[in-house]
Amino acid sequence: MGKLHRLFSSFRPSAATGLNDAESSETTELWLVVGLGNPGESFTSTRHNLGFMVIDHMASVRGIELSVRKLEALLAETRFDASHRALLVKPQTFYNETGRSVGTLMRYFKVPLERIIVVHDDLDLEAGRLQVRRGGHHAGNRGVRSLIETLGSDEFVRIRIGIGRPAQGQDPVDYVLERMSETELSQWRAVIERAGAAVESVILEGLQQAMNQFNRRD
């Protein structure tokens, strides 16, 4: 049995995997934690890939790699405690088509909408500010719009990472796809770590507690 089969058989419902009664009675909640971004080396240090950076950070601190490619995504499993586990997800469909991959993953693993967390950059928040919320209009973010259209609802959890607006005269598309310097990337490190902590708070402490902790202005 290959690595891919072992990983994915562990996520399927017991009826599909032949788990025994002790295993099937396990009450772990499975979450999808999705970072928005674009695949490919040319996009790795852009503002539009901050969602990917958060997923990479969460994987790194847990000593795991997103080594499984399935359903147009790179995936890794992580466990937060005995009752909560998640798939860390980097869709490989490109940012504006994110919904296609996430919708397929949601159906395949039978994850309810309320256990989907999407981490993404946001032009409408000042740079470095986080906002945890459920639902809301896509406000022109094409990745979020793709998710809403594909999932048929906006009622998933969002971790919005503010990147601020571009300088006057700069095209917003150029701004989000602009490669950041090593100095800029190092300045984002604390924000990326905080966004990862916000994801964990939503899963372990609940949405309201996460909002109370991470939405306040320091």
Image (tube, rainbow, N blue to C red):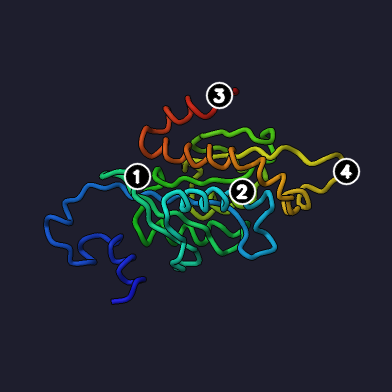
Mark 3 or 4: the one toward you: 3
Callouts 4 and 2 close, C-beta under 8 Å: no
Q: CA distance from mark 1 to mark 4?
A: 44 Å
SS for callout 2: helix
Q: CA distance from mark 3 to mark 4?
A: 31 Å
Q: Amino acid at mark 3?
A: Arg
Q: Is residue 44 above or below residue 168?
A: below
Residue position for label 1? 80
What residue is shown at x 69% (from left), y 53% (from top)?
A: 46
Which image quarter holds the N terminus? bottom left
Mark 2: amino acid: Leu
Q: Quadrant of the C terminus?
A: top right
Q: Position of residue 41 (x, y in %)?
A: 66, 64
Count residues near mark 2 (Cα–Cα under 10 Å), then give few for <14, some for 14-19, many for 20+: many
In the figure, 185 relative to 67: above or below?
above
- Give the residue pinned by disc 4: 169
Query: Dot 1: what SS?
Result: strand
Residue marked by disc 3 = 216
Task: Give the image location of residue 137, x and y in percent.
Answer: 59, 40
Q: Residues within 10 Å of mark 3 (few under 14, many from 20)?
A: few
Q: Which mark is residue 50?
A: 2
Q: Tag 4 or tag 3, which sits nearer the N-term?
A: 4
